[in-house]
Amino acid sequence: MGRPIKVWITSLILFLYGIYSCYEGFLTGIVSYAASGVIFLGVAIALFMKIRGSQYLVYILSVYLIGSWLFGLWIIYTSGWPYEDALGTVISLIPGIVIVLMFIFCSYSAHQFLGKQNEKA
């Protein structure tokens, strides 16, 4: 059985996010950011290669990323956010919401692809 398009998209999202994290980590010198990028790259490859249990790594990375976004949101909230203008506040949330939705999709896709295979085994 070939890989469904959702798995290609999920692996691509994880791979591109991993490249971005590595690039930003090396550019800024933040080792933990670069290391998380390497982990994202590894999980993307593991999922694509149908390595058993890799869907759990996708779940963990999704929770990590969503938790990081919520923590960042809390930090800016304590420093005077939301903005006085409602439109500016809503617009400032869009990139984070898109990332959260992408990683929810990744978790769902990984479950559909590997979770059901593990249930059969």
Image: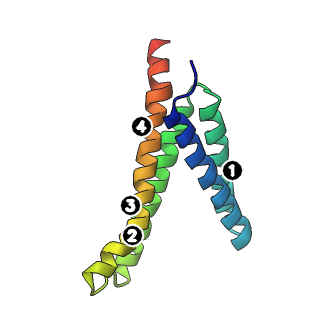
The label number, if any, that marks residue 38 in the structure image: 1
Q: How busy is the neighbourhood of tag 2: few (under 14 within 10 Å), some, or many (20 plus)?
A: some
Residue 77 relative to residue 40: left or right: left
Alpha carbons under labels 3 and 2: distance apart: 11 Å
Alpha carbons under labels 1 and 2: distance apart: 25 Å
Dot in front, 2 or 4 = 4
Q: Mark 4 points at which residue?
A: 108
Alpha carbons under labels 3 and 4: distance apart: 16 Å
The label number, if any, that marks residue 97 in the structure image: 3
Q: How busy is the neighbourhood of tag 4: few (under 14 within 10 Å), some, or many (20 plus)?
A: some
Answer with mark 3 or mark 2, whichever residue precedes in sequence: 2
Q: Are marks 1 and 4 in contact (CB under 8 Å)?
A: no
Dot in front, 3 or 1 = 3
Q: Are marks 3 and 1 in contact (CB under 8 Å)?
A: no
Answer with mark 3 or mark 4, whichever residue precedes in sequence: 3
Under circle 4, the secondary element is helix
The label number, if any, that marks residue 7 in the structure image: none
Under circle 1, the secondary element is helix
